[in-house]
């Protein structure tokens, strides 16, 4: 699966940008979308207008970590992996028996967007299993991206020559668009348009970027680690129905 988001929708961390990245424009002439479909001829591409695009394919997938796609009320979700506590989450979100993992993730996102009772890190932490997902809400032009606590599913992100965010489960696809300005997506973390990158395992700690160096000695993006020495100030659990629209800051 692949998603490329315009920098106005998802601002990639500065630390992902390498000095000699050899990156290209992922959007120009549909470059990265065309490359993806050349590698995966059966791929489906979803045009998100000025916000970017999403693409997925069911070929070459790990049968134990299947790819799923769903769209509900203009919320798009690509999911890779499996959720262990599906039954509990269906009950929690009031979903029917036919709902799959991608539908569960969309409902979890809608809970956050529509003033749900839990902070974002708790919502992601409640999802148990081996997974990664990419959510795009066309109504608010917002993204919601996450990787499980163990990093069980291959997942990578990077920035192209124009600063747009590229995310995929295929490292070679990301390298094609981002050159050396890419890295594995940090496990146990989630990324949102409004809040950037955060750890759902250690929500009170900051993340710090550690430059990656390849075999030739060049900087190749950055790994993000939990900074045990730093703590964020907790503002407590937001109140449902409060005047502040906390969903814009999840």
Image (cartoon, rainbow, N blue to C red):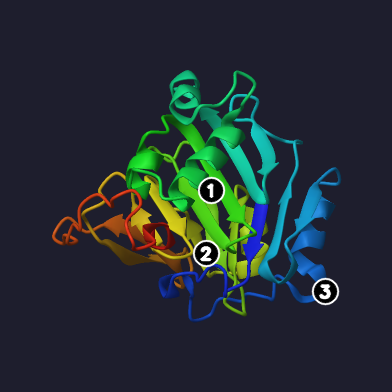
What residue is disc 1 on? 155
What residue is disc 3 on? 29
Q: Earlier in the sequence, mark 3 or mark 1?
A: 3
- Asked whether the beta carbons under mark 3 and mark 1 sit within 8 Å of each other, the answer is no
Name the element at disc 2: strand
Please determine whether, in this image, residue 179 is positioned above or below residue 138.
below
Name the element at disc 1: loop
x%, y% of residue 220? 47, 68
x%, y% of residue 105? 53, 39
Q: Is residue 244 visible?
A: yes
At x 58% / y 50%, what residue is drawn? 135
- Asked whether the beta carbons under mark 1 and mark 2 sit within 8 Å of each other, the answer is no
Cα separation, mark 2 vs mark 3, equals 22 Å
What residue is disc 2 on? 182
Cα separation, mark 1 vs mark 2, equals 11 Å
Name the element at disc 3: helix
Q: Earlier in the sequence, mark 1 or mark 2?
A: 1
View extreme (left): residue: 229
168 lies left or right of 243: right
At x 73% / y 36%, what residue is drawn? 60
Question: Camera-side residue: 250 or 113?
Answer: 113
How dense is the environment of label 3, judged by Cα within 10 Å: few (below 14), some, or many (20 and up)? few
């Amino acid at each position: 699966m692949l998603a490329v988001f315009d920098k106005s929708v998802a601002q990639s961390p500065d630390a992902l940008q390498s000095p000699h990245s050899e990156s290209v424009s992922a959007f120009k002439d549909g470059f990265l979308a065309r490359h993806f479909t050349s590698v995966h001829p059966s791929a489906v591409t979803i045009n998100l207008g000025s916000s970017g695009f999403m693409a997925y394919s069911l070929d070459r997938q790990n049968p134990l970590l299947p790819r799923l796609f769903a769209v509900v009320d203009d919320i798009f979700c690509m999911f890779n992996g499996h959720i262990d506590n599906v039954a509990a989450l269906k009950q929690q979100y009031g979903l029917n028996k036919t709902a799959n993992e991608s539908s569960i993730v969309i409902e979890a996102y809608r809970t956050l967007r529509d003033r749900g009772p839990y902070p974002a890190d708790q919502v992601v932490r409640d999802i148990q299993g081996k997974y990664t997902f990419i959510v795009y809400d066309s109504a608010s032009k917002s993204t919601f991206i996450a990787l499980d606590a163990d990093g069980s599913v291959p997942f990578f992100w990077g920035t192209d020559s124009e600063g747009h965010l590229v995310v995929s489960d295929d490292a070679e696809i990301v390298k094609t668009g981002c050159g050396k300005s890419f890295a594995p997506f940090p496990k146990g973390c989630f990324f949102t348009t409004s809040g950037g990158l955060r750890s759902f395992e250690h929500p009170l700690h900051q993340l710090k970027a550690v430059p990656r160096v390849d075999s030739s000695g060049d900087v190749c993006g950055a790994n993000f680690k939990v900074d045990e020495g730093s703590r964020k100030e907790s503002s407590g659990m937001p109140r449902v129905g409060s005047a502040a629209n906390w969903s814009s800051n999840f």
